[in-house]
Image (cartoon, rainbow, N blue to C red):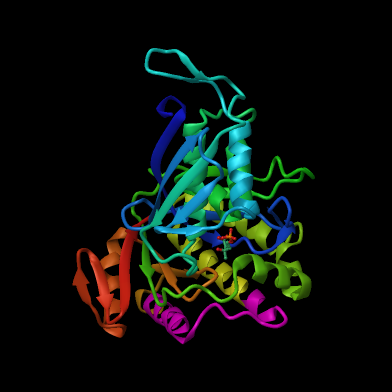
Amino acid sequence: DSKHTFTCTLSSGTNIACIKYWGKKSVALNTPINSSVSVTLDQKDLKTVTTVVASKSFEKNRLWLNGTEEDVTNSKRFNACVDGVRRMGGERRGEGKEVLVEKGGWGDYKVHVSSMNTFPTAAGLASSAAGYSALVKCLAEVFCASESYPGELSTIARQGSGSACRSLQGGFVAWRMGSKADGSDSMAEQVCNENHWPEMRAVILVISDLKKDTSSTEGMGTSVDTSELLGFRAREGGVVDRRMELIEKAYKERDFEAFGKVTMQDSNQFHATCLDTYPPIFYMNDTSKSVIKIVHAYNAWKGRVAAAYTFDAGPNAVIYCLDDVVDEVLALMLQYYPGRRLDGRYVRDGEAWGRARG
Ligand code: PMV
């Protein structure tokens, strides 16, 4: 029934946190124990492309991730996004302006979703952030959803994956933890748009494209239960609150030294928290640690913070730097990890080295 079938395709970029989210206040609502902030990468290299088809004739919601169907019948996260955006659905008109679906008339519709990542899934490169952000944006188009308060879609993306709320916007984006018990004010807010600091670059080093062995949800749960360092880090007026203020000021003033230093410190404290978790979680491997050493040696040689590494829940490195040193940083990495250039990416035996614009 083509009159009652609607479709939308769009893409979303991933984001890489500078001040890390680690720990849930409410697992059910997917709210965090601390605020966080990230840079949304442009969509040149790393992105998710999603198509949503909504129809009354579909029997159930279905999802294909990179071409393989995943059973989403019991996926709380996926269904929270579909149901949440569908409830916000508005009137949809046809080409002759006739009303095809009335406001609030989407109850019988089910969706088929295809989602493709242009980068390794679940390897600590925030694939879930780009994925759930693309899903929520697509659903909003299909269902003609409108927000009853600013940020409502962000609170829905958050329920898919926390970091996804930060990918709905470009540039430098903060996820404010919020204080309301229902999570309705736990949402992302753009601090600076994507044109604010055009020289910003993110060099992505894919050290391993294997799926991480401890999911972020599982890891956060164990850390909240066992790590005293996490409590110290996340408490009100604690390390994270102080760093959020500092880094937002640095980004606004385009102060790379201050931005880079606190980015590296926060990555290190996040991984220290993982080590402080019992039993400990190791996301970085020896290659990751060698990248840290090289970046510090490079900065010492430059006499300033010219490059800043950060690692999420996996061994892969992201190096933030400014445009004027990006070729030097790449040359340095190729010196230690030799490879060859292929279509704008650097490829090593069995490994991919890419570059993306921040
Ligand atoms: O939202 P999740 O479940 O993908 O968790 C993200 C956790 C980190 O990537 C480690 C940090 C962050 O703020 O993105």
Look at the magenta stretch and give its main secondary structure. Answer: helix
Q: Which residue extends farthest bottom?
A: 286
- Across and down, in percent, residue 80 comes to 64, 46
- Would residue 175 be visible to someone looking at this image? no
* Frontmost residue, 23 versus 261: 23
Q: Quadrant of residue 71?
A: bottom right
158 to the left or right of 264: right
Q: Quadrant of the N terminus?
A: top left
> Which residue shows up at 47% across the image and 33% down it?
142
- Across and down, in percent, residue 350 comes to 30, 80
* Frontmost residue, 38 versus 129: 129
> Which residue shows up at 33% across the image and 53% down it?
199
Q: In the rendered view, tell whether residue 253 sits above or below residue 291.
A: above
- Would residue 330 be visible to someone looking at this image? yes
* Frontmost residue, 211 versus 59: 59
Q: Quadrant of residue 277?
A: bottom right
Q: In the rendered view, tell whether residue 109 sits above or below residue 45.
A: above
> Which residue shows up at 52% across the image and 60% down it?
17
Q: How many marks?
A: 0
Find out whether residue 297 is within the magenta segment.
Answer: yes
222 to the left or right of 188: right
Find out whether residue 278 is within the magenta segment.
Answer: yes
Q: Quadrant of the C terminus?
A: bottom left
336 to the left or right of 315: left
- Across and down, in percent, residue 161 comes to 59, 54
110 to the left or right of 295: right
Q: Quadrant of ligand 1?
A: bottom right
- Which residues make up the magenta segment? 272-299
Q: Quadrant of residue 149?
A: top right
- Across and down, in percent, residue 281 comes to 63, 79
